[in-house]
Image (tube, coloured by chain):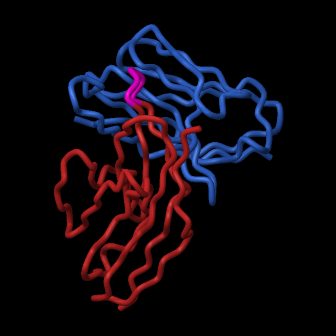
């Protein structure tokens, strides 16, 4: 079965501390993995995708096929990073539909 | 460009009432999606339309129907609302061509069923 697991509902860190939001997936094949972010009173938006292998707002995520993980990392958290983060998976069929994890709320304290 | 728009923003229904949530996109996207967002459960796909003229069930389709009216518009209908359908509903669209697979989301509709 296709599944995305985000084990932490809430992650609270102090400004300047490193952040790692965990994501594990279950999929028989080669999925495409994404991180979406929802800031307060804003729309859900794409943060980054594994095929781009880029850093957005200081965040990076590496796809580990052996551990079936796609953890999101940032070395130094900022208060403006506080938001809801969703890991999502897309299979390689023609529908391009996404399967989302339950989300992790990141709270960065001053 | 307005992107993805949804109406209404808020709605309160009584059990058994019906309503249609409207969604439109102006990005010439092929695919459109309806999700519901519930606390602790993330976003769950209700229905999707991979292309104009097609619709398919997602993870939680029971109690809902959809219509892909044209390439721009994708509506979600609740025929007989139930309290379990209290949720925030998001519409999304994507191009689905080549390697691009970014979904763009609307602002959401907050629905309460009493």
Q: Is residue A51 above or below residue B30?
A: below
Quarter occupied by the C terminus of chain A = bottom left
Which residue is farthest top? B53
Indicate left or right for A12 with A31 as reference: right
In the displayed orientation, state which residue is furthest to the front: A66
Per the picture, the main secondary structure of the magenta-coloured stretch is loop
Q: Is residue B47 left or right of residue A107?
A: right
Nearer to us in this view, B66 or B97: B97
The spot of residue B26 in percent (x, y) is: 28, 27
Q: Colour of chain A?
A: red
Q: Which residues are magenta?
A: A92-96
Q: Position of residue B43 (x, y in %)?
A: 54, 47
Quadrant in which the N terminus of chain A appears: top right
**Left or right: B89, with A41 as reference point:** right
Q: Nearer the viewer, residue B59 or A89?
A: A89
Q: What residue appears at the point 37 percent right and 57 percent down from the top-left corner?
A: A70
Residue at horizontal 54 percent and vertical 43 percent from the top: B109
**Residue B114 part of the magenta-drawn span:** no
Quadrant of residue B64 within the rendered picture: top right
Residue B50, compared with residue A76, is above or below; it is above
Q: Percent x, y for residue B9?
A: 52, 44
Number of marks present in the image shown: 0
Residue found at x 77% / y 44% = B84
Q: In the rendered image of this protein, which colour is used for chain B?
A: blue
Locate residue B56, reporting x and y percent. 55, 19
Q: In this view of the protein, which residue sits in the foreground, A30 or A80?
A: A30
Residue situated in front as seen by the camera: B98 or B90: B98
């Amino acid at each position: 079965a296709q599944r995305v697991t985000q084990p932490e509902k809430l992650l609270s860190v102090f400004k300047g501390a490193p952040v790692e939001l965990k994501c594990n997936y279950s999929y028989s094949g080669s999925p495409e993995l994404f991180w979406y972010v929802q800031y307060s009173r804003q729309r859900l938006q794409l943060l980054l995708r594994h095929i781009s292998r880029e850093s957005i707002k200081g965040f990076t995520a590496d796809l580990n096929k052996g551990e079936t993980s796609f953890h999101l990392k940032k070395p130094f958290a900022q208060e403006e990073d506080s938001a809801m983060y969703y890991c999502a998976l897309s299979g390689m069929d023609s529908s391009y539909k996404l399967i989302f994890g339950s989300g992790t709320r990141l709270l960065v304290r001053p | 460009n307005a992107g993805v728009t949804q109406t209404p923003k808020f709605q309160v229904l009584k059990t058994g009432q019906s309503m249609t949530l409207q969604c439109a996109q102006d990005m010439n996207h092929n695919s459109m999606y309806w999700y519901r967002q519930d606390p602790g459960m993330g976003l769950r796909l209700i229905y999707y339309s991979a292309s104009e003229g097609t619709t398919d069930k997602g993870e939680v389709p029971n109690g809902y129907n959809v219509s892909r009216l044209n390439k721009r518009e994708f509506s979600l209908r609740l025929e007989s609302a139930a309290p379990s359908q209290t949720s925030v509903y998001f519409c999304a669209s994507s191009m689905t061509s080549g390697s691009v697979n970014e979904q763009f989301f609307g602002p959401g509709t907050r629905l309460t069923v009493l």
